[in-house]
Image: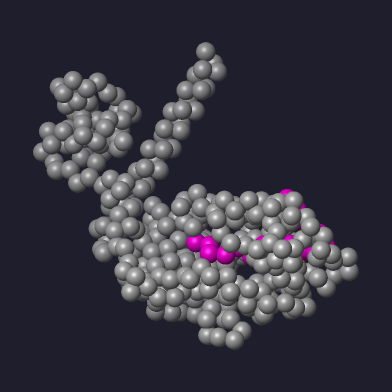
Amino acid sequence: PETISVGELANRMAVRQGEVIKTLMKMGVMATAAQSIDADTAELVVNEFGHRVKRVSDSDVELGLENITDREEDLKPRSPVVTVMGHVDHGKTSLLDALRTTTVTDAEAGGITQHIGAYQVSMPSSDRKVTFIDTPGHEAFTAMRARGASVTDIVVLVVAADDGVMPQTIEAIKHAKAANVPMIVAINKIDKTGANPDRVRNELLNHEVVVESMGGDTQEVEVSARQREGLDELLEGISLQAEILDLKANPNRPAQGAVVESRLDRGRGSVATVLVQKGTLKRGDIVVAGAHWGRVRALLDDRGRQIQKAGPSVPVEVLGMTGVPDAGSLFVVVENENRAREISEFRQRKIREKATAMQVAARGTLDQMLA
Ligand code: GTP
Ligand code: MG
């Protein structure tokens, strides 16, 4: 149930805490400033002070996300969103580089992915695209799922043929299964001496992943990111899987989606890489992401070019947020700044309350320990 601390309530009405405590006493409620009271009691107090209550409930706040259901006829095909996962150094970034024909790995410090990249790659024989997300580990994937942002349609599991199934490979398999996302196995580094793709296939069996060549239904592709082998086959595999999934979204509505990465840039301020899931994000839109909001000042595509708008499955960098939203936060376009402010303030308050509750709990255990 919704609650508010006495102190916060006083703060919001701009009255002294003592006044609120006194009013509560008159109503037969004994509370200190740090204690929380339920929303109904709070409303009575507010009325006593001659204010009116404008309640923002959890469901209200999230309504922006759910209240517009799309009609079947408004749905249009969208690109699949593919997350590349696998053990450290098995070649995730190299594989994406090869697919994009750029060299992101060279620019990365020590060749270890420092951030999530989100890119679009064109299919070899059509004008369709695939959106790829490169992860610096599985935390980002897990964080997104924990926050309810299931952005991934397909997982590409990269396993180095010379190294085989390793702890993070197993982790990735677990995540994909838990999220119920179909997986395609990319057996990488087949150019290396000592590469043994069949060993990979066998090791995968131990984790209930049965690839097609062993009679199962998980697609597998042998690739070499370095020699640029098997890339078209991998894209075709993704395309096939995407067709089965029949992915659609309505591009003609206010945008919503998820933050895949964010940072504070010295020159540009808050930079959030978001993945649009529904609708179309436009310059000038007012966006709420997690506990932050802002007016979209600029949109940049995956090559850093300014664009005016981004539709479903398109990853974009958003400039103009007032803060740095956590990766995995949902974002939604709202009608005006007041609404945006209301939602972000509500969420910030929730975060503060949670932090206080945790402090109180920690204090409690400390007291117990000292007693
Ligand atoms: P993290 O982001 O740190 O988890 O690593 P990653 O999975 O992105 O691996 P990355 O692409 O950085 O590649 C790790 C090393 O393997 C680099 O030295 C690559 O050059 C090498 N490598 C990647 N793919 C291939 C391949 O197909 N063949 C060979 N021989 N080497 C490869
Ligand atoms: Mg990497």
Relative to 350, residue 87 above or below: below
Quadrant of res 183: bottom right
Considering every residue shown, the one lying at the far right of the view is: 193
User: Could you say which is closer to the camera, residue 263 or residue 257?
Assistant: 257
Looking at the picture, tell me which residue is in the foreground, 259 or 221: 221
The picture places residue 216, in percent across and down from the top left corner, at 69, 62
Apparent side of residue 202 relative to residue 259 in the rendered image (left or right): right
**Residue at the location (78% across, 78% down)?**
227
Q: Residue furthest top?
A: 371
Name the residue at 47% across, 65% down.
274
Viewer-nearest residue: 117 or 8 = 117
Q: Is residue 322 left or right of 175 when viewed as pictured?
A: left
Is residue 65 visible in the rendered image? The answer is yes
In which quarter of the view is residue 193 placed? bottom right
- Residue at coordinates 29% horizontally, 62% vertically from top-left? 68
Residue 281, horizontal then vertical, whole percent = 38, 71
Residue 12's x, y, as percent? 24, 41
Q: Is residue 185 visible?
A: no
* Image coloring type: one colour
Numbered disc total: 0
**Image: 22 above or below 107:** above
Quadrant of the image containing the N terminus: top left
The magenta stretch spans which residues?
151-168
Q: Is residue 88 magenta?
A: no
User: Hey, which quadrant is residue 277 in on the image?
Assistant: bottom left
Give the residue drawn at x 29%, y 24%. Answer: 32
